[in-house]
Amino acid sequence: MPNYYDILGVSKDASQDEIKRAFRKKAKKYHPDAKSSEKNEERFKKINEAYQILSNPKKKQAYDQFGDAAFSETGGFGQGFGGSPFGSGRGTSSGRQGPFTYTYTTGGAENIDFEDLFGGAFSTIFGGGGFRQRRKGQDLRAQITVDFKDAVKGTKEEIEYNGRNIKIQIPEGTRNGLELKFAGEGGRAQDREGKELPHGDLYVRVNVQTPRDIILRGSDIYTEKEISAIDAMLGTEIPVRVVDPDKESGLGTSKLKIPAGTQPGDVFRLRNKGMPYLHGRGRGDAYVKINIKIPEKLSKEDRKLLQKLQK
């Protein structure tokens, strides 16, 4: 994710008024209706995205504290801010996650009140009578939710959107939040003479419906397992859930060796047991966080044995 402060050209301690003024200046310069350049359209999308985060105090605070990790999809039981949703632990590696999830539009400025930002000078800034003519129809956005097994193996879906049936190829190893582009399937537009312009594009965001006990981060999955205190002290072997493209559900099991002396919160990695990589060979990893169950009640015999060990 790009640095939003650099995009707007403001410092990290900039006030909301300074952020708003910076956005005005950048938006005037790079708005697609003022600059007929595809490069400027992409730049304006980034400017719009940066403004939506930094102009919202809560989102700005999260961004300042956690950076881009604050805005990745999260859910379930992930509470850590380290290399995985579990936080620090043995066997972890770097990842992207966070305690916040925000939805923001990056496809244009339809959610920005330009009259508020530019005032009455808005029509003058972009050329007397208003915006320049569109070069194509408006880009549109839609969402689709797929089952976990379909994200693992890939599938074909069909949606009805804007009066048309559109076939969607969900690739193998689809990750949560993947955006698919369908050129020419967006909105329609005409020029001043009534001539039909090229259609805009359609962007479809794919949401993956994961099982409750699994967190999906990119091509990696994260789960938790509970073991007894004795197993943690002496070591054991347990079955854990992993991705298995050969299974109907897309999930299988694998054995994980728990070494003696395992501590609460330790995280173990099973290599190549995650989602297939998008458009490439190999797979992500599966991470397992270990929780240790402490008995609430003990028998007299167990208590005597533990007291003996304590001494």
Image (cartoon, rainbow, N blue to C red):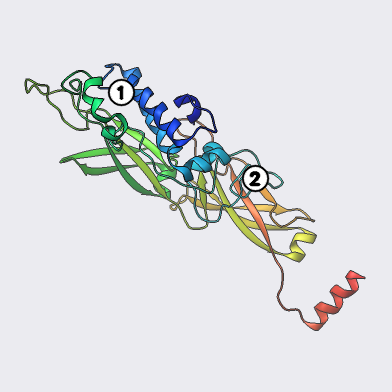
SS at badge 2: strand
Residue 232 in the image: above or below residue 31: below
Q: What is the quadrant of residue 182 in the picture? A: top left
Image coordinates for residue 257, horizontal then vertical, percent: 71, 52
Q: Residues within 10 Å of mark 2 (few under 14, many from 20)?
A: some
**Which residue in the rendered view is the most extreme toward the right?**
311
Q: What is the quadrant of residue 53 in the picture? A: top left
Image coordinates for residue 100, horizontal then vertical, percent: 50, 47
Amino acid identity at mark 2: Arg
Amino acid identity at mark 1: His
Mark 2 or 1: in front is 1
At x 12% / y 22%, what residue is drawn?
191
Give the spatial CA distance, label 2 vs label 1: 46 Å
Q: Nearer the viewer, residue 85 or 180?
A: 85
Residue 66 in the image: above or below residue 37: below
Q: Nearer the viewer, residue 159 or 276?
A: 159
User: Are dots 2 and 1 in contact, CB under 8 Å?
Assistant: no
Q: Nearer the viewer, residue 186 or 107?
A: 107
**Which residue in the rendered view is the most extreme toward the left?**
193
Question: Going by the image, does 235 lie left or right of 134?
Answer: right
Question: Going by the image, does 259 lie left or right of 246?
Answer: right
Q: Residues within 10 Å of mark 1 (few under 14, many from 20)?
A: many
Residue 156 in the image: above or below residue 76: above
SS at badge 1: loop
Q: Nearer the viewer, residue 222 or 26?
A: 26
Question: Going by the image, does 51 lie left or right of 118?
Answer: right
| Residue, disc 2 | 269
Residue 257 in the image: above or below residue 61: below
- Label for residue 31? 1
Label 2 vs 1, first from the N-terminus: 1
Q: For the C terminus, which image quadrant?
A: bottom right
